[in-house]
C-alpha cells in the first residue's frame, strides 16, 4: 500500500491530469473572465463531494475500472496531441502512443508502492517549476484582461463550476480505495493543492492571453510558457517546462493502469482494453479534430454522472489491499 505522503502526491497529480489536452481551453470559453471564480467554487464543491465519498468508504471496483479507462483514454489523447503538435512534429502519433503505453505497462508490473515512490521522485521537479513559472510570467500579467467580471451567462457560470468539479475530482475517486486509515484532512490535502495549482495556471492564462483568445487555443497552458524569456535572450524554455505536464500524464497513467490491472485480475482482458484505447486514439480521435472537439465538449457531463453514481452505488464487497 502507499503511505500518507505518497497518497497526497498522487492525489495532486490526479487532480490536474484531465485538464491537460483541452480542459483549460473549454472552461475558459465557458467561464470567460469568471474563470477564477468558477474554479474556486468548483474546488469547494469538489471538496464537499470528496468528503461524502470519503465517508462512504470503499468505492465500487467496477466504477473505479471505468474511471481508469477514461483516464487512460484521455491521457493517451493528451500525450499524443501535445507531443506531436509542439514537441515531436514529424513523429507518427502511433509511435508516441505505443511508447507511452509500453511505459505504463511496465509500471503496472510493479507494486503500488513503487508507483508511489516514483511520484515522490517527481514531486521536487513539480515544486521547482511551480516556483519558477509564476516568477517568470509575472511581468506579462495584465489585470485589465481579466475584466469585466461576470461577463458570462448564469447557465455558463454554473456549467463552469460543474466542469471544474468533475474534471478535478473524477480521477481522485480511484485513489480512495487506497486511503487505508487516513483522515479526511490527509485525503483532501492533495486535492486542494492540485486545485490551487490549476487556479494559478488559470490566472496566468486569463491575465496573459485574455479569455477570448485563450478559448481558441488547444493548449493555452503550454503556449503561455512560450512567452517566458530568461535574462532577455534565452527563450524556448517551454519545451523543458512542459515536462511538468508529461510527468503528470505518466504518473496518473501508471496509477490508473495499475488499479485497472488489480481490479480486472485478467491479463487478457486488460490487454484487450489497452488495444481498444490505442485503436480509438489512432483511428478515431487523432485522425479527426471534429471527434476531439466532440469528446472535449461532452465528456465532462459523463464525469459528473459517474461521480454522482459513485455516491449511490453499493461499494465492493471486498476492499483492495
Image (tube, rainbow, N blue to C red):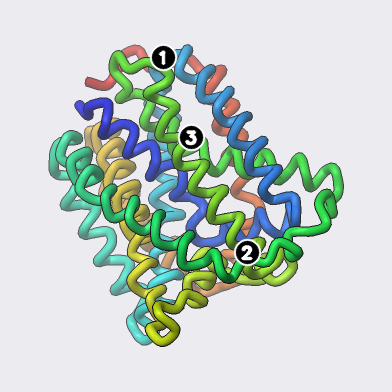
What is the CA distance from the residue labelled 2 to the residue labelled 3?
29 Å
Q: Which residue is mark 2?
A: 293
Residue 174, given in percent of the width and then of the height, sits at 39, 32
Q: Which residue is mark 3?
A: 192
Q: Is residue 21 visible?
A: yes
Residue 49, given in percent of the width and then of the height, sits at 57, 24
Q: Residue 74 versus residue 44: which sits nearer the camera?
A: 44
Q: Which residue is mark 1?
A: 57
Instruction: Choose the circle earlier in sequence order: 3 or 1.
Output: 1
* Residue at figure coordinates x 28%, y 62% from the top left: 100
Residue 63, given in percent of the width and then of the height, sits at 45, 30
Instruction: From the viewer's perspective, tell me whether residue 42 is left or right of residue 261.
Output: right
Instruction: Choose the circle earlier in sequence order: 1 or 2.
Output: 1
Q: Nearer the viewer, mark 1 or mark 2?
A: 1
Residue 31, given in percent of the width and then of the height, sits at 73, 52
Q: Residue 83 versus residue 150: which sits nearer the camera?
A: 150
Q: Which mark is residue 283?
A: none
Q: Residue 230 versus residue 33: which sits nearer the camera?
A: 230
The local crowd at label 1, few if under 14, some if 14 to 19, many if 20 or more residues have their Cα within 10 Å, is some
Instruction: Choose the circle earlier in sequence order: 2 or 3.
Output: 3
Q: Are marks 3 and 1 in contact (CB under 8 Å)?
A: no
Instruction: From the viewer's perspective, tell me whether residue 104 is left or right of residue 45.
Output: left
Amino acid at each position: 500500500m502507499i503511505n500518507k505522503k505518497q497518497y497526497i502526491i498522487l492525489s495532486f497529480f490526479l487532480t490536474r491530469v484531465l485538464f491537460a489536452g483541452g480542459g483549460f481551453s473549454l472552461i475558459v470559453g465557458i467561464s470567460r473572465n469568471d474563470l477564477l471564480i468558477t474554479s474556486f467554487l468548483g474546488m469547494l464543491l469538489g471538496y464537499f463531494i470528496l468528503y461524502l465519498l470519503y465517508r462512504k468508504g470503499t468505492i465500487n471496483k467496477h466504477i473505479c475500472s471505468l474511471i481508469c479507462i477514461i483516464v487512460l483514454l484521455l491521457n493517451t489523447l493528451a500525450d499524443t496531441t501535445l507531443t506531436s503538435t509542439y514537441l515531436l512534429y514529424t513523429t507518427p502519433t502511433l509511435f508516441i502512443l505505443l511508447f507511452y503505453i509500453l511505459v505504463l505497462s511496465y509500471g503496472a508490473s510493479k507494486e503500488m508502492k513503487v508507483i508511489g515512490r516514483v511520484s515522490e521522485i517527481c514531486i521536487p521537479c513539480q515544486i521547482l517549476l511551480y516556483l519558477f513559472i509564476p516568477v517568470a510570467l509575472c511581468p506579462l500579467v495584465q489585470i485589465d484582461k481579466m475584466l469585466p467580471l461576470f461577463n458570462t451567462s448564469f447557465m455558463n457560470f454554473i456549467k463552469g463550476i460543474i466542469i471544474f468539479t468533475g474534471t478535478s475530482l473524477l480521477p481522485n475517486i480511484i485513489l480512495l480505495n487506497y486511503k487505508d486509515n487516513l483522515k479526511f484532512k490527509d485525503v483532501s490535502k492533495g486535492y486542494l493543492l492540485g486545485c490551487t495549482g490549476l487556479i494559478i495556471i488559470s490566472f496566468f492564462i486569463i491575465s496573459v492571453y485574455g479569455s477570448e483568445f485563450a478559448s481558441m487555443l488547444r493548449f493555452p497552458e503550454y503556449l503561455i510558457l512560450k512567452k517566458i524569456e530568461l535574462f532577455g535572450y534565452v527563450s524556448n524554455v517551454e519545451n523543458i517546462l512542459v515536462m511538468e505536464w508529461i510527468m503528470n500524464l505518466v504518473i496518473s497513467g501508471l496509477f490508473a493502469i495499475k488499479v485497472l490491472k488489480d481490479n480486472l485480475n485478467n491479463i487478457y482482458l486488460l490487454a484487450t482494453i489497452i488495444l481498444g484505447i490505442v485503436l480509438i486514439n489512432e483511428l478515431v480521435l487523432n485522425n479527426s479534430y471534429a471527434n476531439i472537439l466532440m469528446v472535449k465538449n461532452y465528456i465532462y457531463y459523463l464525469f459528473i454522472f459517474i461521480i454522482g453514481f459513485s455516491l449511490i452505488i453499493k461499494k465492493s464487497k471486498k476492499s483492495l489491499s
